[in-house]
Image (spheres, rainbow, N blue to C red):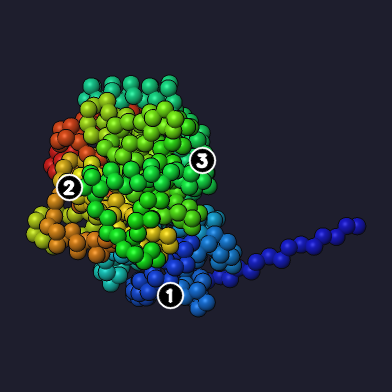
Amino acid sequence: MSTYQMPEATKQAKLKARQVHLVASGDLRESANRVCWSAQEQMEAALGKAVEACGFQVVRAHPFKPDVGHGFISSQKEGMRVFAPLDPTARLIVAEAVWQYSHHVLAGLSSHRGPILTVANWSGQWPGLVGMLNLNGSLTKAGVKYSTLWTEDFADPDFVAKLRKWLKDGELKHPLKHVTPLKNVKVPSKERKLGEALAAQLQREKAILGVFDEGCMGMFNAMIPDDLLHATGVFKERLSQSALHAATLQVADGEARDVYEWLLRAGMMFRLGSHGETELTQAQVLLQCKMYIAAVRIAHEFGCNAIGIQYQQGLKDCLPASDLVEGMLNNSDRPPVQMPGNGRVLYENRPLPHFNEVDECAGLDGLMTYWVHRAMGQPVENTLHDLRWGDVDRSGTTDEYVWVFEISGAAPPAHFISGWRGAVGERQPPMYFRLGGSTLKGVSKPGEIVWSRIYIEKDGLNMDLGRAKVVELPESETQRRWNATTPQWPIMHAVLYGITRDQMMARHKANHIQVVYATDADAADRAMFAKASMANAMGMRVCLCGERRHGRKWR
């Protein structure tokens, strides 16, 4: 008779009735985890007191690690080890004061049967809000049930009341009265027909997203399954960042110098130093200029309509950051890149849309936005931003709530006050980018915008759209907001129409938000209707959020 050695089962300890587990997902880069740990520690202490005020006790599921100087889960394998012995039916809080890699905890959360609550502190510092929104979008895509909370003050009675409800019921829902399905909106005929015609053209002619390595920073929510993407008429060309690295090193020094001098003539200013470990150097910028040329040529070789460079992992260890490259690509007015041999200018007088951090949802959105705005004669430059943080305006310029939209450098200068002359290059923070590289920093100009986000829910593509305006704030208020976030990065002061802070947080399913300008408010309305109609004709579930403008409903 055969005998088998059975694997030793992991022992799972039951929590007491009024205990709740807490986990904290962190970065993969230990330098970032160490720098950000103190903010996480403070947040967890405040959250623990709030839980105690509700009559419960926090049981942290993993310890502080003295050898690395932080208490984050910092890899997928560590996350699996942490979750294996946990009570799978226990209440569980994912607490985030930092940017985090969702795949560190996604495996454990996917099989957890107890109530899950994601929580972030209302701070733009590292930022936990962005990390939590990414995790929420990833859980939504994975079909994992969860609740979510955020607060500026963990002792706030409203926050404590909502936390108490989740601890009691295992579920917490936020009102979403600002969301209107497109089917309930009367869309103008002209814009509806244009959107449907563009969808039919895209599905007939097809388009290619050039993907330089998928899965940046554990963003499960940012990867579109091939079958869903193919139904829209868009296909992926899977490219390698190693190929981009090799092609970058093959670009001639003189070509890189031409790009650099074009930027200087256009008015961009670089804050250069001599110590590359902490300062931006000309050598770093020239390498970025080579990467720009290489990226355009590879995109042309494979017929890409848009590209996304991962860069946060892998490429960051051998080249400077790609943000300056990405901002140039997203702009119509940019240094020309010629085809070797025949001198033909590639993608001449137009952007090559780039989706930062290989966020394929943003890539599809950016491609659609380009098509719609080109057809309507509207500005075609668009970009994603992090939905970073928001605050009241301390300058007294406006009594409206002003969001900070901010990204690591991929915003096009066409969005900036004074364009290229308002663009500044600063070194990327060393804790993220050891080899540095210039950002493309600027302040977004006042004007009317359309915002949008594609996300995956219930195994299908969804798109939320809304209207907003960009306001101009005094330099001191802009600097205050930069100092509260990342001062090296481009910033947009956004006021959403008909959407409160908490409504936006409750609904949004991603760390990123797509933005594009229109020439005026009526043009922005029309462009949004056309894009919503295009998305609907491509098979997406489409919702409009908020209002056309304050007080003007969609219906």
Q: Three-letter amino acid code at disc 1?
A: Gln
Q: Is residue 178 left or right of residue 438?
A: left
Quarter of the image that includes the C terminus:
top left
On the question of residue 449 being in view, the answer is yes
Q: Three-letter amino acid code at disc 2?
A: Ile
On the question of residue 244 being in view, the answer is no
Instruction: Tell which of 494 and 348 is nearer to you.
Output: 348
Residue under circle 3? 239
Quarter of the image that includes the N terminus:
bottom right
Residue under circle 1? 57
Residue 83 position by quadrant: bottom right
State the SS at label 3: strand
**Residue most toward the right?**
1
Residue under circle 2? 417
Q: Percent position (x, y) of residue 268?
A: 24, 49
Q: Three-letter amino acid code at disc 3?
A: Leu
Instruction: Tell which of 109 and 296 is nearer to you.
Output: 296
Residue 71's mark? none
Mark 2 Cα-neighbour bin, 10 Å: few <14, some 14–19, many ≥20 = some
Q: Which of the two discs, 1 and 3, sits closer to the camera?
A: 3
Q: Percent position (x, y) of residue 503?
A: 27, 51
> Mark 1 and mark 3: span between their CA atoms?
48 Å
Q: Is residue 215 left or right of residue 129?
A: right
Q: Mark 1 or 3 closer to N-term?
A: 1
